[in-house]
Amino acid sequence: MVVLFTSKATTSGGREGHVKSEDGLIDLQLTTPSALNKKTGSNPEQLFAAGYSACFDGALNFIAKKNKHRIESSITAEVSLLKDETESPFSLAVTLNAHIKGVPQDVAVELVKEAHGFCPYSKALRNNVDVKLKVSVE
């Protein structure tokens, strides 16, 4: 494998801390979301949703072009933090909402499935995180 690039970000203070990327473009206060918490800040799930949606939309457009389809798309990633009563109680679940213009529903569904097999984030999560795919067309 050839490394194309490496991104770096450093967090201190965990979920109530601060995260900054090496280039300074990301420089965010972190906070644990809850109805009682009045602090302003991001959280790891929000940051993961941003990265996954960007990566997946890129994969979807690559796959569409490869299959000779012209589309316009947006991806909304919903990343949920789950808790149960097991020994390792926290896990993630993801729903990817694909909104696609330019192809019929059946073609859009096939493009999203193929993109899910191609996207590096999807590959990293396979067999570890439940990822649901939802597709809507205009």
Image (spheres, rainbow, N blue to C red):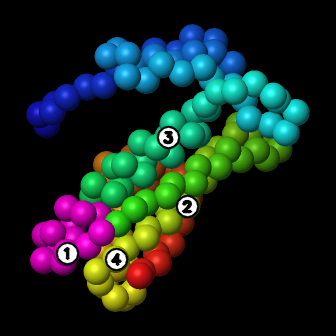
Q: Amino acid at mark 2?
A: Thr
Find out whether residue 65 is within the magenta segment: yes
Residue nearer the viewer, 134 or 137: 137
Task: Tell me the distance, in whole angstroms, between the alpha carbons under discs 3 and 2.
Answer: 12 Å
Name the residue rendered at 63%, 15% in the picture.
17
Marks 4 and 1, the one that precedes in the sequence: 1
Q: Position of residue 126 (x, y in %)?
A: 43, 55
Image point (15%, 69%), residue name: 65
The residue singled out by tag 1 in the image is 70
Q: Sequence-wise, which precedes: disc 2 or disc 1?
A: 1
Residue bearing mark 2: 95
Task: Quarter of the image for the N terminus: give it.
Answer: top left
Q: Amino acid at mark 4?
A: Lys
| Labels 2 & 1 near each other (Cβ < 8 A) | no
x, y (%) of residue 61? 24, 63
Residue named by callout 4: 101
Taking the spot 74% from the left edge, 35% from the top edge, the residue there is: 33
> Which badge, 3 or 4, comes first in the chain's sequence?
3
**For the view shown, which residue lies furthest in the right direction?**
36
Labels 2 and 4: the sequence-earlier one: 2
The kind of residue tagged 1 is Arg
Which tag, 1 or 3, sits closer to the chain's start?
3
**Vertical arrangement, residue 85 with respect to residue 73, above or below:** above
Magenta segment, which residues? 60-72
Could you give the CA–CA distance between mark 1 and mark 3, rounded to whole angstroms?
28 Å
In the visual, does 9 lie left or right of 83? left
Q: Amino acid at mark 3?
A: Phe
| CB atoms of marks 4 and 1 within 8 Å | no
Ranked by sequence position, the earlier of labels 3 and 2 is 3
